[in-house]
Every structure is written in C-alpha cells, then in structure tokens.
Image: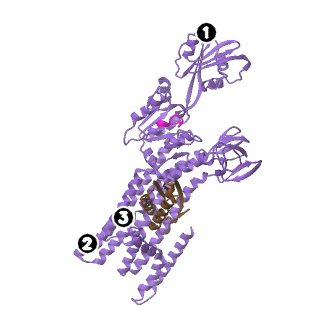
Chain colours: A brown, B purple
Amino acid sequence: MRKTFELEELDCAACAAKMEDGIRKIEGVSYVQVNFLSQKLTLEAPDEIFEKVLKKAAAVCRKTEPDCRIIR
Amino acid sequence: MTRKQKILLIRIIAAAVTLAAAALIPADDKIKPFLFLVPYIIAGYDIIKRAAVNIIHGQIFDEKFLMAVATIGAWVLSEYTEASAVMIFFQIGELFESIAVGKSRKSIAGLMDIKPESAAVLRDGKEIRVPPEEVEKGELVTVRPGEKIPLDGIVVQGSSSVNTAALTGESLPRDIDVGDRVVSGTVNLTGAVTVKTESVYKDSTVAKILDMVENSSSKKARTENFITRFSRYYTPCVVGAALLLAVVPPLFAGEWIKWINRALIFLVVSCPCALVISVPLSFFGGIGGASRRGILIKGSNFVEALAKADTIVFDKTGTLTTGTFTVTAVHPEKMSEQELLSVAAAAESCSNHPIAESIIAAHGSDIDRARIGKVNEYAGMGVESQIDGEYIYAGNQKLMEKAGAVWHGCHIAGTVIHIAKKGEYLGHIVITDRLKPDAAGALKELKRLGISKTVMLTGDRTEIARRTAEEAGIDEVRAELLPDGKVKEVESMLRPGKPLAFTGDGINDAPVLARADIGIAMGAMGSDAAIEAADIVLMDDRLSAIPEAVRIARKTVRIVWQNIIFALAVKAAVLTAGALGYANMWLAIFADVGVAVIVIINAMRALSSGKVRK
C-alpha cells in the first residue's frame, strides 16, 4: 500500500532529507519520499504492517524535528 | 504572514528592545549578565529547548543545536551582547527564510490552480454539486461560463469557447460545440455547456497533470543527488574542523578563548540548508514554469538531460507535419484538372481514408450520391467505384495494374493517386502532408540554441522525406523505416554524455519514446498513452514548444549551479575568514540564513521562466 500524508510544521529542508533517510531504514519500507515543498510524506509498505511502519515513521519525524506531525 | 511568523516577529522586536535597554541601563558588572539574559531567552528559548531535546535524541548536527552551542559559548566567554544579538539576528534570518519558503510554496500552489473544485452533475433530472471525484463515467455535467471543466468528456449540448491557457500556455480561446471533446482543467468562457464524461476524475487529464507535477521531484537530477550526498558529509566535517580549531592551535599557542570563538563561527556555518533547499526548489520552479506553458516534464533528471541535449530526432508524420494531406498537383491526361478532380472525388466519396478526405476537400463542391453505384475498397491499393455505371479506379500503381491501365509516374514528390476509367488512364493527383507552420522556425531556433544535430525518421518514401526535411531545415533523414526500424535507428544514435531527445506524437511511437534518453510526446492533450510513455509531454502540437523547453531547462540548470556555487563560495569564504580570525558571528549567520534566503529568491526565477509572454 502506498499512501500520502500531509506533514505539519516541517520547517527545514535538511531535516526533510534526514527524515527520508531515517524512514527508509525502517524495516518493511519499500518506498518513501518526504517532500519539503509540498509538505508531504509518501510511504509504501506491505498492508499488514503498514500501521506499524507508519508509527515508526512518525517517531523518526519527531526525533528529527520535534514540532513535525504526520496528519492522518 | 502566518501566526507562527507573527509570533516570531514580535519576539524579535521584544528581544531587540530589551537588548538595547540592557546595554543602556547602568548596572553593576555582577547584575549586567542577568539583564542580557532577558533578550537572549526571549529570542532563543525555543532554540535552547530544541537543542536540549536533540541531545537526548542524539541529533547533534542540527542547525538549532549548533546555534545554541555557539551562543552559549559566547556567553561563557562573557560576550553577553554578542550572544543575545547573534540569537536575534539568527531568528531574523529564520523569519526571512520561512517567509521566502512560504512565498515559493504559494507560487507553486498557484500552478496547481487547475484543479476543478466541484462538478454540477445531473442526476434524476436534478442538478447537484459534488466533488469531481464522485462523478461516474458517462454522467452529464453542466459547466457554466467561468467554471473549470471538471472532467474530460464530449459536449452534448450548448456551445462555448474554452481557455486552455492553464494547460497549454495558449491564450487564444478554442471554440467548442456539440460533439467536441473537452479537457478537464480548461476554463469555460462564454456559454453554458453540458458535457458527457468520458472518464472518472482519477483518469482525467487534470488529475494526471497534477500527479505528474507533484511527483516530478521524486525523479532526482544528478546534481540533486550530489548535493544530498555532499550535505551528509559537509556538516560532520565542518563540526569536526571546529573541534580541531578549538583544541589544536591553543595547545601550542594558548589563547583558548580566541580559538574557541573562531570554532563557534564554524558551527554556525555548518548547516547545509541553503544547498539542500535551493537545488530541488530551482528544479521544481523550472518544471512548474514549464507546465504553465503546456510543457510537462516528469522529473528534474529530464530537465538536466534536456539542458544538455545534443541530438533531437523527430518523427515525420503528425510531428513535423500536420498529419493531414492536401492536394498539391492535378495532372490529367486529356480532360481538365477540375474534371479529373471531380471524377476522383466521386470515386473516393464513400471512403474515409485520409487520402480520400483530402481529395474530397480539394474538390470542394457536393457530390451527387445517386451517381455512385457499387464501391470496393482494396486495402493498400485504393478504391474501385461504379460511377454513372462505369468503373473508376483511384489508387496506387498496384491498382492500375489490376485495372490494366498504363500509368506513368510524376516528377513531383508526394503520394501519387492514379485514376483510371476501366483500362483507360485518366491521370493522377499528387497529395502531400504539409509541414507545420512553425516547423522551420522551431528548427532554426534549435540550431541557434546549439543543438548539434537534428534527424528525421519516417516510414515514408525517401524523396518525400528529403523534401520535407529540406523545407523544415533538418540535418539528416532516415526514410522508409519499418516501425521497429525507428527504435534501431535511435539506438544507433545514442551516445553516452550526449543526450538524445526523440519527438513523436506519442501514439505509435511509445517504444521509441521509451528508448530515447528524453522522450517528448506532442499534442498529448487528452491522450493517456502519450502521457504515460513520454518523459516530457507537450500538451498541444506546437513545435516551437521544443526550443522553449530547452531554454527553460537551461535556465533552470543555470540557476541551480549559480546557487550551488554561490552558497559554497560564501561558506568557504566565511570558514576561511573565521579560521584566520577575520570573521565574526554576524558574518557567520549571514553565511547561513542570509545565503539561504538569497538562493531561495534566485531559485524562484526558474518559475518565472515559464511566464506567458505578452
């Protein structure tokens, strides 16, 4: 499943790149793109573990940019 | 300004006022530091907090963490005024950066303005407004003047004109009437029309375009990947250098404070934000600007390739030529030209072959259908029609041989249609495919831009191909090619480092489009196949869009390099000056946020390269 989420308060381009790197390392992620310009996260992972992956991705976001939230 | 930006502005002002007050109030040396603490905290509390959080997370190469370290460092060195002022200055930079980014986001969002908000769909005799996504295929939708066409479809009622500028860059309105195809995202201008939808929203032209522009940033250019990799090493390197600078020289020469001060400057300059933001932003600006001119580019890698394009290959029919035939010569044996044309038109009147249509169009006046009897079409040869009871043959040599007529060729290049009455040869008509009116101009423009070679591929006969190439100003011709021959020709011309672009109509050329370094599909408005197959899609069939695309690509790449070189040069200069003791904290902050603001503003020039010329 591939899904796109809006990101809130993504303020720095370097952080977006770091988030992307961090999320790519999560197990099960087959595609990820953090777009700083459109403030969007596109994530692809197998359906059955998608929620789990998304949670881990949210944690990565919080770690790199504490104010940043994934809007579901 | 957003709420967040306003709060930041107020904090900056408050911090500046309290800083001035702290500097002016005469106070004891023991109390003074506490006075300076007020502006420092007002300006930087979030940064300090953030730095603390980052330490817990182990994120030490974060801009804000480094800023905190740098100012606390200044504090420790008893440079109170500087610590507060630097924090304020940094926040001013952040504010500017945030405003600049917001502005560019808005201009990009402006490009996405083609999305229709709602559709007035007719259900059970009533008109209801729903989001375009909820309209089914085959439903009737009413579009009033001033509204966007919500879905691709056919006009079933009313007539109007539409503005396609948002999709094609063409500002001249296009007239639409019952039976015409309309494309979603164009704006209905004069009258209300009812449209029968041909696809659901997801498959409509406007959804495809939006999807393409939004996802174009995922296909990254080499420059973009280089910068991402570079920035991964840049920050740790600069931070490492700062540590060395703070420790090594004083071990030998002492003066710890002086060297720590210089190291702090390094920390401030170590954020790669300006680079990381400006490169994709410039590419996106170029892609966005091009899309305004009806040129859709599927990724920044193609912008880069197009800017360096060396060879451009064209398909002939439908790309360089209009794809519709016109009669250029009528050569009767005995009768008058008009008589021959009239016989031919009557013979062809039941056919809808493009050749037949061109002869009928040249004849002009109506044909009395009652005169026509039995009609036989021979595929690849022509037609045999009974007119006033007599057999008339119109077609190529093979048909003449079949009819037993003695034919002869023509000195004019073109497709020759021979006409015979039973075994008697009546003469021939020459028809040619016409060059697009802007072809010669576009080719000249490409030459002027320094494209080293232009090639035409066609399945047509060599002599026809030669003449078309000469008229258009094409360098090389490869004619009489079978469909798979085009792929082979393109393959033989591919050279590493010298990108080759192939331009075709996108319908029959999909394999060639895919094989070329850059596949350009023309006249793609409403054609899904073309949009899928190509790397660059031209919404209408203007050939002049190709030099335009090259120009936009080159401008974009130029801006990207300007930004990279400018940002790196300023940072290198400030780092060098900092190490030697010629730079202060202020300059360092300029090298960080100031440069970021400047490159963002420069990047936005790429967007304007696509502005409609007045």
Would you place residue B260 above or below residue A17 in this image?
Answer: below
Quadrant housing residue B59: bottom left
Q: Amino acid at mark 1?
A: Glu
Q: Which residues are magenta?
A: B504-512
Instruction: Measure how far apart labels 1 and 2 are at the Cα level.
Output: 104 Å
Q: Chain of mark 3?
A: B
Q: Is residue B506 magenta?
A: yes
Q: Is residue B414 magenta?
A: no
Label 3: few (<14), some or many (≥20) within 10 Å?
Answer: many
Task: Specify whether disc 2 shares its chain with disc 3.
Answer: yes
Task: Specify whether disc 1 shares its chain with disc 2.
Answer: yes
Quadrant housing residue B265: bottom left
Q: Position of residue B551 (x, y in %)?
A: 47, 46
Residue B185 visible somewhere in the drawing: no
Number of marks in picture: 3
Kind of element beneath mark 3: helix
Q: Amino acid at mark 2?
A: Val
Kind of element beneath mark 1: strand
Closer-to-camera residue (B220/B454): B220
Residue B309 visible somewhere in the drawing: yes
B458 relative position to B351: left or right? left
Q: Amino acid at mark 3?
A: Thr
Instruction: Measure how far apart labels 1 and 3 are at the Cα level.
Output: 87 Å
The mark closer to the camera, 1 or 3, is 3
Instruction: Measure how far apart labels 2 and 3 are at the Cα level.
Output: 20 Å
Of the image marks 2 and 3, the number of the one nearer the N terminus: 3
Q: Which mark, residue B248? A: 2
Residue at label 3? B235
Residue at label 1? B424
Q: Position of residue B45 (x, y in %)?
A: 47, 77
Label 2: few (<14), some or many (≥20) within 10 Å?
Answer: few
Kind of element beneath mark 2: helix
